[in-house]
Image: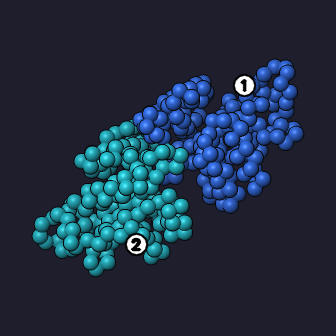
Chain colours: A blue, B cyan
Amino acid sequence: MGEQGARTVDESAIRWRDEVTAEDVERIGELVEATGFFHPGEVSVARELVEERCAKGDASGYHFLLAEAPSGALLGYTCYGPIACTESSWDLYWIAVAPSAQRIGLGRRLMEATEQEAAKRGGTRMYADTSGREQYSPTRSFYERCGYATAADLEDFYAPGDSKRIYAKRLT
Amino acid sequence: MGEQGARTVDESAIRWRDEVTAEDVERIGELVEATGFFHPGEVSVARELVEERCAKGDASGYHFLLAEAPSGALLGYTCYGPIACTESSWDLYWIAVAPSAQRIGLGRRLMEATEQEAAKRGGTRMYADTSGREQYSPTRSFYERCGYATAADLEDFYAPGDSKRIYAKRLT
């Protein structure tokens, strides 16, 4: 995708994929790293969830949605799944958009497609966690624009002075 | 332990153990089932965490503390561990006391010993989740007596009308 032209998602130029392969472990790791938002421990977790999915399929509890350019370049992805021991609550574990594909509404499209998929599988609520730190203010605004409301803010959860903000949205 | 006599923990009659073996999968499953507090899906999760610990050791992220009678009967246990991607927050995944050993303060002792162990390993906060339903009022009272405060209540989390109550305690 060029940097010129209208900065909105060109749906015809995006390939959607909901199965991951062993090759995606590295590709997703690189994407998450490239956003600059996650520390090495978190990047490792992102990779591990792809491995879990490859090894166990649906039984892993992790579902994926990948958005790719016609060239095959990974533009963004989500990792989400049903929360164990709940009737119909789902968790958005990861959402990341490549720097080159940001500000074109791709995050919003990924979120909508992910919510639809969860709802199709019986999900009635989606949860998403993020940090309460100033650095994550764009992330929180993004969730709020997507219709998420703050359900909780756990003080000092990630580290002293770094709270966990829990967002929730009712799926329809 | 007889049913007669003072209903307080006789420390000399309790064996503490912090390593689990394959045999504990079934014993812990039976204990959790016997409490009558958990549905079959939850009992399966309790078993799986023991298997994870046996397979991966500390890398599983699950630590255990077991209280046994001199006869070897399992009286109670906790399963807890550091929360991934946090600096020093820990989660109490399970605490259960056998019906025959309830009301003697064993839950309290298990909790204290678990918190001490987490603090020794660098934990500064312990989290414990439970249901907001009426049936779990004794569980919530127990956490409150142990010094836990409500950090959040996630409406309809477990099921419609069944919220998740998140308790937190600062470890010293």
Position of A171 compared to B107: left or right? right
Q: Do labels 2 and 1 share a chain?
A: no
Measured in 3D between alpha carbons, the distance from the residue under mark 2 to the one under mark 1, in whole angstroms, is 54 Å
User: Does residue B13 show up?
Assistant: yes
Position of B104 compared to B117: left or right? left
Place residue B39 in its image quadrant.
bottom left
Three-letter residue code for mark 1? Arg
Q: Residue at x 83, y 37 (%)?
A: A69
Q: Which residue is drawn at 65% across and 57% down?
A: A52
Residue B27 badge = 2
Decide: is B100 above or below B160: below
Q: Which residue is drawn at 21% across and 72% down?
A: B12
The image position of residue A67, as x and y in percent, is: 76, 39
Place residue B121 in its image quadrant.
bottom left
Most extreme residue toward the left is B5
Q: Which residue is drawn at 50% across and 62% down?
A: B58
Residue B117 badge = none
Residue A103 badge = 1
Decide: is B43 above or below A108: below
Chain label for disc 2: B
Decide: is A127 above or below B98: above
**How many discs appear?**
2
The image position of residue B142, as x and y in percent, is: 27, 50
State the SS at label 2.
Answer: helix
Front residue (pair A98, A113): A98
Three-letter residue code for mark 2? Arg
Chain label for disc 1: A
User: Does residue A57 show up?
Assistant: no
Position of A98 compared to B48: left or right? right
Indicate the quadrant containing the N terminus of chain A: top left, top right, bottom left or bottom right. Answer: top right
Position of A42 compared to A77: left or right? left
The image position of residue A11, as x and y in percent, is: 81, 30
